[in-house]
Amino acid sequence: MDPVSARKFVDGWVAAWNAHDLDALLVHFADDVTFRSPVAAQLLGGDGIIRGKEALGAYWSEGLRRIPDLRFEVLGAYVGVDCLVINYRNQKGGVVNEVLIFDGPLVTEGYGAYLGDDENPAGATAG
């Protein structure tokens, strides 16, 4: 992934989250995407692994329903060969990293990563 493509992705990602526009977010994800997050485990139960774009949309929709004031501020973006890490602050001031693995233009794997000392990451974000 080149820095220009990464910047464009990050700008669109944060704009879509802040607008609560799930369609704009999901267009970048493969149909068979997997997304792992401890917040998913807290919100939905289970192992915290979301399988498939439809399930990811349902998870994020539930997160937005529970956190209507959700808002992100990007603090940094880190570009790898086929990955992107977005470091951001959420509406509660919590700092989160979202790790996205790409196959071509689409995200095939995602990981929400939180500080180990957060007492309640589910209240912090929908990611």
Image: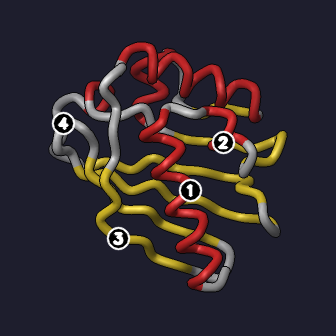
Q: Which residue is mark 2?
A: 24
Could you tell me residue 13's position as x and y percent?
A: 54, 53
Under tag 1, what secondary structure? Answer: helix
Under tag 4, what secondary structure? Answer: loop
Crowdedness near tag 4: few (<14), some (14–19) or many (≥20) residues, C-alpha within 10 Å: few
- Please tell me the numbered disc located at residue 12: 1
Could you tell me residue 101's position as x and y percent?
A: 65, 62
Q: Amino acid at mark 3?
A: Gly
Which residue is painted at 36% across and 62% down in the image? Answer: 87
Q: Which residue is mark 3?
A: 76
**Pair 3/1: label in front:** 1
Q: Amino acid at mark 4?
A: Lys
Residue 48 position (above or below residue 94): above
Query: Are circles 3 and 4 on residues that touch, CB within 8 Å?
Result: no
- Mark 3 and mark 4 lie on one chain; the one further toward the N terminus is 3
Query: Are circles 4 and 2 on residues that touch, CB within 8 Å?
Result: no
Which residue is painted at 48% across and 49% down in the image? Answer: 15
Q: Amino acid at mark 2?
A: Ala
> Gap in Å between the C-alphas at discs 4 and 2?
23 Å
Q: Which residue is mark 4?
A: 92
